[in-house]
Amino acid sequence: MDPVVGIDIGGTAIKAGRLGPQGEPQPAAARPTLIENGAADLCDRLADWARELGARAPLGIGVPGVFAPGTRTLVESPNLPALEGCDLRLEVAQRLGWAPECIAIDNDANVAALGEARLGAGRNAGDLAMVTLGTGVGGGFVFGGQIFRGGLGQGAEVGHLFVHDRERCDEPCGCGRWGCLESFASATAAMRRARRAGLTDDLSALCAAAREAPGPARELLVAIGEDLGRGLAQVLVLLDPPTFVIGGGFGAALDTLLPGIRAGIAERDFAQRHPQIVAATLGADAGWIGAACLAQSEGVRAN
Ligand SMILES: [Zn+2]
């Protein structure tokens, strides 16, 4: 099997690498996104880097944001607004002299879920839902070995599940609505809740304190876990995934969140399920690995 290149575009850094002949990940050193130089410059650099990595079609790309229904044009990308209105797949394909179908593109959370499903925490797990706890809360579902996108390609936005009435909210979600899971369980929300409770907002120190002894730090992480569990329970009720993979920077605190998550699920799941809840294992490589996996399954080879 030819090596396949995957690229994961983040707000500040781009990660890329190749899956070797046996599917072994060969990561390259990350590069800065430099979105301030504009979309065209970014597309130039993506195409150059793909060539440097020896990319032959198909190539996979992950990018944060939402695509217009039925298209590969980004309509909303809060971290990379300069890409809104850009058909990144077409732009990069043109620079490489390829047909657009030679590039498989999807949002970053979806490709990360596919990476974990194929080569990470979910490799023997079957169907799974991945939830990423970072600046926001991202979601990606892999069912039957493939990304589940919903009818118009805008599904799996777990971060905007409703978990609490407005009276329980400190501030609105980034989407402008009140009560979304993201405003209770993202890394950003955890830091805000810690500050309000008079605790350290250094998440690793907070988690260390929670592990060490009962007290306010542990209580806060249980409370955040419960809110996350209320969200996961809704995913269970609708889609019944047997496994949840928890990733993102704050996902490293899964051990301290887990008692709360179980309690939140027990509170809301009528069927009292006990899904597997495991930590992601690919870390920051999940996105480019998943993008390469997507290219293997959906990208078209060049003639
Ligand atoms: Zn929201």
Image (cartoon, grey):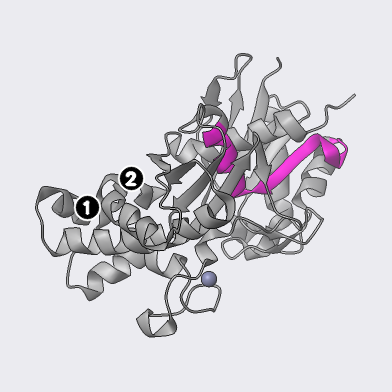
Write down the residue under mark 2. Answer: 252
Note whether residue 181 is visible: yes
Residue shown at 50% from the left, 60% from the top: 234
Q: Is residue 246 above or below residue 179?
A: above
Q: Earlier in the sequence, mark 2 or mark 1?
A: 1
- Residue at the far bottom in the pictured view: 167
Residue shown at 66% from the left, 29% from the top: 5
User: Please, what secondary structure does the residue beneath circle 1 have?
Assistant: helix
- Residue at the far right in the pictured view: 303
Amino acid bearing label 2: Ala
Residue shown at 11% from the left, 61% from the top: 215
Residue 165: horizontal and vertical position, in percent? 43, 80
Write down the residue under mark 1. Answer: 207
Q: Is residue 71 above or below residue 123?
A: below
Amino acid bearing label 1: Cys
Q: Which residues are magenta?
A: 97-117
Kindly check if marks 2 and 1 are in contact, taking CB atoms under 8 A apart as contact.
yes
